[in-house]
Amino acid sequence: MPRSEQANQQIRDERRRQILNVAAEIFARKGLAEARISDIAAASGISQGLIYRYFASKEELLRAVIANALDQVLTGLQELREQPGTPWEKLYRLTAYMWEGMRRRPAYVHVVLHTLISEAVPEEIRALARRYVRESYTFFRELIVEGQQAGQVVLADPEELTLLYGSLLQGLATGAWFMDDYSEVQPSIERMLRILKP
Amino acid sequence: MPRSEQANQQIRDERRRQILNVAAEIFARKGLAEARISDIAAASGISQGLIYRYFASKEELLRAVIANALDQVLTGLQELREQPGTPWEKLYRLTAYMWEGMRRRPAYVHVVLHTLISEAVPEEIRALARRYVRESYTFFRELIVEGQQAGQVVLADPEELTLLYGSLLQGLATGAWFMDDYSEVQPSIERMLRILKP
Amino acid sequence: MPRSEQANQQIRDERRRQILNVAAEIFARKGLAEARISDIAAASGISQGLIYRYFASKEELLRAVIANALDQVLTGLQELREQPGTPWEKLYRLTAYMWEGMRRRPAYVHVVLHTLISEAVPEEIRALARRYVRESYTFFRELIVEGQQAGQVVLADPEELTLLYGSLLQGLATGAWFMDDYSEVQPSIERMLRILKP
Amino acid sequence: MPRSEQANQQIRDERRRQILNVAAEIFARKGLAEARISDIAAASGISQGLIYRYFASKEELLRAVIANALDQVLTGLQELREQPGTPWEKLYRLTAYMWEGMRRRPAYVHVVLHTLISEAVPEEIRALARRYVRESYTFFRELIVEGQQAGQVVLADPEELTLLYGSLLQGLATGAWFMDDYSEVQPSIERMLRILKP
DNA sequence: AATGAATGAGGTTTCATTCAT
DNA sequence: AATGAATGAAACCTCATTCAT
């Protein structure tokens, strides 16, 4: 007797997520080119062939990983956007949220970084990854301008402040991974925000 | 014919440097895995075979590129170390020097970044790249501590300050490359150093 | 419940024949290697797995298709053999029958052709397909010899005549398929037989 | 010291032709799908990789084989066209030429047949193969019409005659291959032309 | 010193077939 | 009887590297 439609769907959903998570990890560590489908299959405990029932190609799998990450971040930002508070409070929550995200899913940050820095990745996927960064920066900038209007953020060029703030977050996200000596150091949110203080 | 031998050696040195520069560019854009020896040969205007007269393998070539970058940065840092001035003046010069370097040789930054984030690169080479970062951080930290003693740098945990400052530089170096919207923005040295101000 | 068993058997027979017909079509268009079991399953409206309840393998399925075609042609030839008339009348009926068959079931002709010309098909199946041709040729030859004895067929080497006549039929069968310009042309039976006329 | 430009070119030309000839043989026996690049490499006595320095893909190789065959046939037909004689003499020479060609390069005939009969072959290549047949048929038709005007060919529909004549040739070309019993039979040119006689 | 023809290992992807349900 | 998820064996193709000239 065939499995019920529902049971099948559940199996498929679960498998898909499983592959997606494993792939994020492997892509994060090796990048698109050096990540082997066999690595992902082995780490998922399935055969290589099965991956192709869920994703059309290795590149398609990477795209799905990034779209997934993008989705989660955007959802989080959207929630933050809707919360009340002064601009500075919002900046504080945003910074905490980003920092927390980097700590919990470092793979996401690294997949995106790999994708952005390698021209070998198809432009379409890179565009997706760029959107990931751009959306974040746009939100940073909004809050910075609000903060300036409220007198809580220094009156400098908002573009410059956004770039500095964003770069700091990005540098922290990537640096912590491979600088063992500093991986224990936990910079305080307040200190990060120092760069925006009047 | 010593003259001819000398000339030969000069040709060899010249060619070696040429390959090294081209390779830095290509490794920076694609990473180790996706950079093709044929790309490098073509861009250098020589045959594939000839590259192997200068470098034993593709990995060896990457190592040479990184060693070269490392060498240049360390030399620069050493010069800065020997110059006189207050700690803050030194920090200013250091920041300007790093920023200038990133702007002039972005390829170096990216080769190192590629190497650091990809586990597919042989550990030996990654260790070299890590040294690149570590040496810089060590210098940052020295100056920060000196600055604290001179009352010019905020009295916070030096490790934390070093990480923040280093991450900011690193984030600026990588971010500017692919964030077109912000590639024109020129953050001021003073503002970068804001993060260390008392 | 004998009734249900009987019904079951009927369903099975029906389904088997359905798969066989679909497979003939697909094998005819793509050949053994490029015909996908999934194509056949989809076109039959059943799952891939189910095909294996009816046929042990893709090759086995091809064999059944050819055996089926062979069976139908041989039955037809047998009927012709038993009909009365002069040798020439029989040749006329044979030619009309073959031509009609090609027109109505072009897939059969093409499956057989695919099988005959591809060494990639297992020898056992090719032998079956060859038998298809051989049996026809044997019948052609019989009638040609009879015709010669009756003075209705030219007195040339019967082998040569058989080959020419058979090749003509075969050429017509395959050629018409892909020569669009000539697919409308309907050669008359008399003209085909011209090659055997005294 | 590098090889001279000329020597290199010679090596390349020879290799290319060698691969082309071997490939014709293998494609003729197995068709595009079942012909293995490894088969062709082994039969050519070279590595698989080398084939890709001469032909971009397996399909591209098939295309080259067919273009090559097409080229040779068209050249031959052109020469025949320019020779003097009555229409019937020309038809005789044409038939002899085609028959001779089939006997000497049966592989060409079969590659073309494989290509025409399999929908799995890319349409672009099939179009090339169709051109092979069409050009021949066009020439057949020309001579048949001329023959009719000269009273040497029966006054039937030229299309019908062309189809019959072409099918006969085609059937002979393919049939002889796998009908062992008849492979020794050598039909006379005169007898083949019988189908066009008044 | 220099070239580029040649090799061969290894990766992605496809699909016939099996098997749990 | 029926499904479709899962497997695994090839096959195509790409390159780093070697080597004859």
Image (tube, coloured by chain):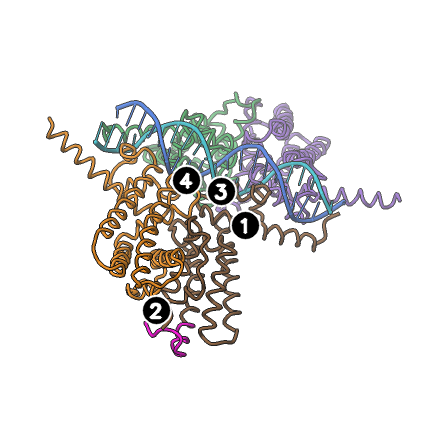
Chain colours: A brown, B orange, C purple, D green, E cyan, F blue
Magenta part of the chain = A143-159
Q: Which mark is residue B123?
A: 4
Expressed as whole percent of the image width and height from the top left, the position of residue B184 reads 30, 64
Q: Is residue A45 magenta?
A: no
Q: How far apart are marks 4 and 1 (CA)?
A: 31 Å
Question: Regarding mark 3 in the picture, which secondary structure is present there?
Answer: loop
Q: Are discs 3 and 2 both within one chain?
A: yes
Could you tell me if residue B110 is visible in this image?
Answer: yes
Q: Mark 1 points at which residue?
A: A55
Subunit ID for the residue under disc 4:
B
Q: How far apart are marks 1 and 2 (CA)?
A: 39 Å
Front residue of this view, candidates C21 and A180: A180
* Above or below: residue C1 compared with residue A68: above
Q: Distance between the residues labelled 2 and 4?
A: 38 Å
Question: Regarding mark 4 in the picture, which secondary structure is present there?
Answer: helix
Q: Mark 2 points at which residue?
A: A159
Subunit ID for the residue under disc 2:
A
Q: Which residue lies furthest to the bottom in this view?
A: A150
Mark 1 and mark 2 lie on one chain; the one further toward the N terminus is 1
Kind of residue sitting beneath label 2: Glu
Task: Give the foreground label among 3 and 1.
Answer: 3
In-image side of B174 versus C15 (left or right): left
